[in-house]
Image: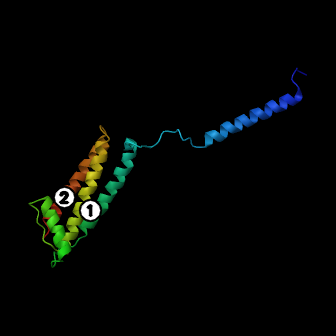
Amino acid sequence: MSGVHPMRAVIAGLAAGVFAAGIIACASVPSAQQAPTTSPRTGPMPGDNRDEITRLMADIDREKADQAAVPESAGASCGADCQAVADAVHANDNACSPPPTQTCTDMCKLGTTICETKDKICNLASQMRGDQWAADKCTDATTSCTNAHDKCCTCH
């Protein structure tokens, strides 16, 4: 037998096993020092913007479908709420004066929402300098905003 006492060999084996188990346990628990996906100062990291842009583009697609579903007939005036929307649209674009009808109000509210969503997309895309995909999404959203605004302004 070698010069190691059998009990020391058992203790050394147990210590090695406990050490290995500790390493395995630590490796399976998320570390507080892992790289965060967001930075407290800058918000989402650039890679995270693609998911948000994709979600916002889906919102625009739904809003465009809703706008396309608004009936063409203008109908009668719908009162103060419709007038408030018409006034707000005109205040932002002097050349745009939709009548204060429910149809035009619906058309203009959806147009405003599409343009607000476009602003969010383009803001995120600007944080992703050099990313052609993001730039293209901003361009697509800008086109959707322009079209939606035109539908509001040509409503009668």
Q: Is residue 123 left or right of residue 95?
A: right
Residue 125 lies, in percent from the top left, at: 30, 45
Please report contact status of discs 1 and 2: CB closer than 8 Å, yes or no.
Answer: yes
Identity, as a three-letter code, of the amino acid under mark 1: Lys
Label 1 – label 2 distance at C-alpha: 9 Å
Quadrant of image for the C terminus: bottom left
- Between residue 85 and residue 131, name the one nearer to us: 85
Disc 1 crowd rating (10 Å Cα; few below 14, some 14-19, many 20+) is: many
Name the residue rendered at 32%, 54% in the picture.
57
Residue 136 lies, in percent from the top left, at: 27, 46
Name the residue rendered at 56%, 41% in the picture.
31
At numbered mark 2, what does the secondary structure look like: helix, strand or loop? Answer: helix
Identity, as a three-letter code, of the amino acid under mark 2: Asn
Disc 2 crowd rating (10 Å Cα; few below 14, some 14-19, many 20+) is: some
Q: Is residue 11 left or right of residue 89?
A: right
Question: Which residue ends up furthest to the left in the rendered image?
Answer: 95
Circle 1 is placed at which residue position? 64
Give the image quarter of residue 144. Answer: bottom left
Give the image quarter of residue 103. Answer: bottom left
Q: Is residue 31 above or below residue 114?
A: above
Name the residue rendered at 22%, 62% in the picture.
111
What sort of colour scheme is used for the picture? rainbow
- Between residue 118 and residue 72, name the one nearer to us: 118
Residue 19 lies, in percent from the top left, at: 71, 34
Q: What number is the disc on residue 147?
A: 2
Name the residue rendered at 31%, 46% in the picture.
124
Whichever of callouts 1 and 2 sits on the residue coming sooner in the sequence is 1
